[in-house]
Image: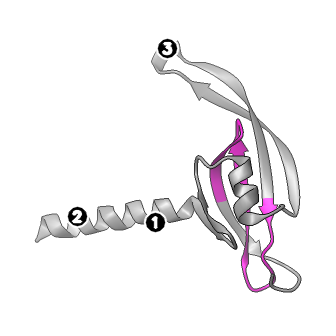
Amino acid sequence: MKCAKIALVLCLAFSADVLADSMHCEHGLISRGASKSTVLAACGKPIARNKLNESMRRGVGKHHKNAAAKGEAWHYNFGSRTLMREVRFIDGLVDSITTLGYGFGSNM
């Protein structure tokens, strides 16, 4: 019984992590690893785009180095009754999706 409870907790934790980095749009679901063109096709144009200066650690142990990565943040507003989202791209692919506060204007 104890193993079943642990397995359930792990499954719920994993599913919450997957849902945190995905976003449902009018024309599809996007998640980590999606390209900019896939996000545009599924969600349309964002209300704002910002360039990011990202520094990433690449490599393992003493063989690592810090490298600059091309980053961009897109913001989506789906109306006043829905939470806004920030989609962060690193090197052209979705790296993270963050839920922001409620949007503004009429629901789309």
Q: Where residue 104 sits in the image (x, y, percent)?
A: 86, 80
Q: Residue at x 74, y 65 (%)?
A: 43
* Earlier residue among tags 2 and 3: 2
* Earlier residue among tags 1 and 2: 2
**Mark 3 in CB contact with mark 1 (< 8 angstroms):** no
Give the Cα distance between marks 2 and 3.
36 Å
Q: Amino acid at mark 1?
A: Ala
Relative horizontal placement of residue 22, taking residue 87 as reference (left or right): left
Residue position for label 3 = 62
Q: How many circles with numbers are drawn on the protein?
A: 3
Q: Secondary structure at mark 1?
A: helix
Residue position for label 2 = 6
Q: Which mark is residue 16?
A: 1
Q: Quadrant of the N terminus?
A: bottom left
Please name the predominant secondary structure of the magenta segment in the image. Answer: strand
Q: Secondary structure at mark 2?
A: helix
Q: Quadrant of the C terminus?
A: bottom right
The part of the chain drawn in magenta is 75-97
Q: Amino acid at mark 2?
A: Ile
